[in-house]
Image (cartoon, grey):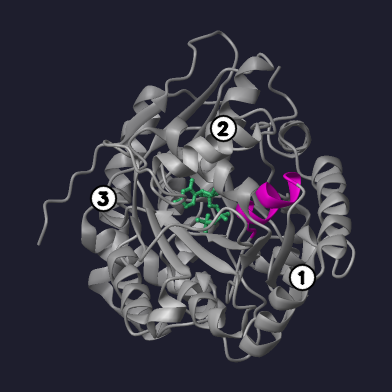
Amino acid sequence: MTKNRTVPTWVHFPLQSNTSRLIHVNATAKGGGVAELLSHLVESQASAGLSVGWGVISGSSEFFDLTKRIHHLLHGSGDAGLLQDDDLASLYRTTLRPQAEWFADHLAAGDVVVLHDPQTLGLAPGLSSRGMRVVWHCHIGSKPDETTPHSAVWQFFEPYLKYVDTVLTSRAEFAPTQVPESRRHVVLPAIAPESPKNRDLSDSEVDSRLSGIGLLGHEYAESEAAVEQDGPIPESAPMVLQVSRWDPLKGMAEVLRSLERLPPEAHLVLAGPEPREITDDPEGLAVLSQVRRVREAMPDALRVRAHLVTMSMADPERNALLVNALQRRADVVTQKSLQEGFGLTVTEAMLKERAVVASDVGGIRAQIRHGRTGLLVPAEDDAAFADAVAGLLRKPARRRELGLAAAAGARANFLMPRLVHDYRRLVHPTLN
Ligand code: UDP
């Protein structure tokens, strides 16, 4: 049993001021969409004059194991019976209760605290009892039906949800029904167009960043990523890309298996974080190992076209620029998720005028208009997925058309100023 460290840390300490503050709390400062989103949302809110902070909880590996299993339950898979286990309920409660005290000691009545995702929801009672307004922004979810265990999760969270004033989700059906409808709102995530992840890069910068990690040849020492490949990608070869955490719901192995159905000149890059650096996602190593095994088992002629990239998150700016370069080099970007609350990677690729093929699930449905700004395929239909990618690889004009419409859609609906505005309207109408 690892030691249960229960002291949160500040990523961004709120400016002390006479006005009330807005504090975001989540489970990790790096890796994954919420950390990406918060880093830009906090910066934008601070430059809009708000006294804003960002804290990160800590927890044992057992705690993050439990929260990852809850994450899967909210995506419709796993055994909801685990939530009957009193020891796990107690682990959740006792990990978060002292951290709620810690935050409350640093904050004051009247402050607004936004708890992101299920990992932090257990802070609600301790904050609410000290006069803070608690908002829960849940970025994950799936459509509940009779076979999914949502109701068991909401029952588990009942003691916490009753202290939540407002719930935000990326689709209405992701929200817990016991919170009155008037206090549930849909808020779609957003990306920062000028950030290192999304800003314009010249072709030569794209080339040098990808050459720098060896993907196009010439690897330099001290590269920020490890590339597993039999040889570099030829300059003229079309490239298909998926950037994701190594999570079973992201479908990385299935994308790799689709390579045999793609045109023989196409190369595939699967890129994700170095799993040992991501503390709140215990499944990373196992999923990466599985993907490695699928690649190793491929015949030589296929394996030479499959490239695995694991990126260090130690230098967030270099990581972001590398993801940016990968997305710009790609001819088709995929997001073959089995479930997805909202895929930031989809919007990042769309903003860069990429043709995207993604699963027709969750928040992705709000991001892509099928046939107009990208292609949606049924999540479980591997053949339809491969056919859609192969079709686009053969039709550059169609890719261009989808890519231009995708960028226009992303600019119109999914940039940070819109999210800042949504927060001002729904989360802190009375703060500055
Ligand atoms: N990302 C990254 N490096 C990686 C893998 C992902 O920077 O190796 C970023 C990706 O560009 C995106 C975020 O992490 O900004 C993932 O967000 P998304 O909503 O797509 O998925 P999540 O990880 O939150 O499920």
Label 3, secondary structure: give it: loop
Q: Residues within 10 Å of mark 3 (few under 14, many from 20)?
A: many
- Name the residue tied to disc 2: 205
- Mark 2 vs mark 1, CA separation in Å: 26 Å
- Report x, y in % for residue 241: 57, 61
- Name the residue tied to disc 3: 59
- Does the magenta-highlighted stretch encompass residue 345? yes
Q: Amino acid at mark 2?
A: Glu
Q: Main secondary structure of the magenta part?
A: helix
Q: Residues within 10 Å of mark 1 (few under 14, many from 20)?
A: many
- Report x, y in % for residue 276: 26, 53
Question: Which portion, as a residue range, is magenta?
Answer: 342-352
Which residue lies at the image location 58% right of the left edge and 72% below the top edge? Answer: 337
- Does the magenta-highlighted stretch encompass residue 327? no
Q: Amino acid at mark 1?
A: Leu
- Name the residue tied to disc 1: 392
Label 1, secondary structure: give it: helix
Q: Looking at the picture, does residue 197 appear above or below residue 90?
A: above
- Which of the 4 quarters of the picture holds residue 364? bottom right
Image quarter hosting the N terminus: bottom left
